[in-house]
Image (cartoon, rainbow, N blue to C red):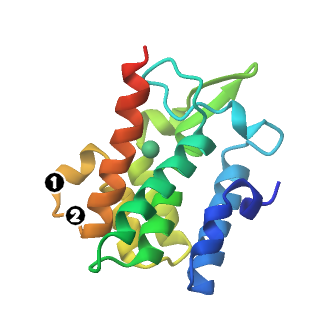
Amino acid sequence: MKIEELFPEVNEIKDSVLREKVIRVWEYAIQKGGWEDFPLDKIPFTLLIPTKRNLVEHTRTVTRMAMAVARERDDVNMDFVIAGALLHDVAKLLEFTHNDGKVVKSEYGKRIRHPVGGAMLAEKFNLPYEIAHIIAAHSKEGEFVTRIPEAVIVHHCDFIDFHIEKGKI
Ligand SMILES: [Fe+2]
């Protein structure tokens, strides 16, 4: 499936070079993580809680929530918000693997969490360092740096979605 169909929000990125890079990172992670023949909607967004919410749904929700917040501000780069939100969890495709149809933590994932893996993917495809920062700082790792406004937004929207899901257990 085309990444633009999986994540229609990618088309909202105005900078065409940035948009193409976001698409290429997702394509690369799908291939490198070995998910080409696995239904992406069967990948949970987290292994920390039992959830039916999948990674694509979570990523789209976080992206749309982040866009809604960014629209109310005049001090954030909307392209960075969209690109950062779409990529914040892309390295879960490396952190997780599948075994007999079950999604489990990968050997890579035991050593490199997705905020770090995702930042490395952003670097690999020459995305602006701000995107690597948004990815690297979206979770606990971000407590050790000062987040740029776009990273503050993605971080909070990510946790809104996580905490709401957690509250349903
Ligand atoms: Fe997330």
One can see residue 82 in this view = yes
Q: Position of residue 49 (x, y in %)?
A: 44, 20
Residue 160: image tag: none
Name which residue lies at 47% across and 76% down: 79
Residue 156 pos. (x, y %): 30, 49
The amino acid at mark 1 is Phe
Quick check: which quadrant has ligand 1?
A: top left
Identify residue for label 2: 147
Q: Write down the residue under mark 1.
A: 144
* Residue 103 screen position, x and y as percent: 63, 25
Distance between the alpha carbons at the discs numbered 1 and 2: 9 Å
Question: Which secondary structure lies at badge 2?
Answer: loop
Type of amino acid under label 2: Arg
**Which quarter shows the N terminus?**
bottom right
Left or right of 164 in this view: 127: right
Say if 88 sits above or below 95 in the image.
Answer: below
Q: Is residue 91 visible?
A: no
Q: Is residue 52 left or right of residue 85?
A: right
Q: Nearer the viewer, residue 160 or 18?
A: 160
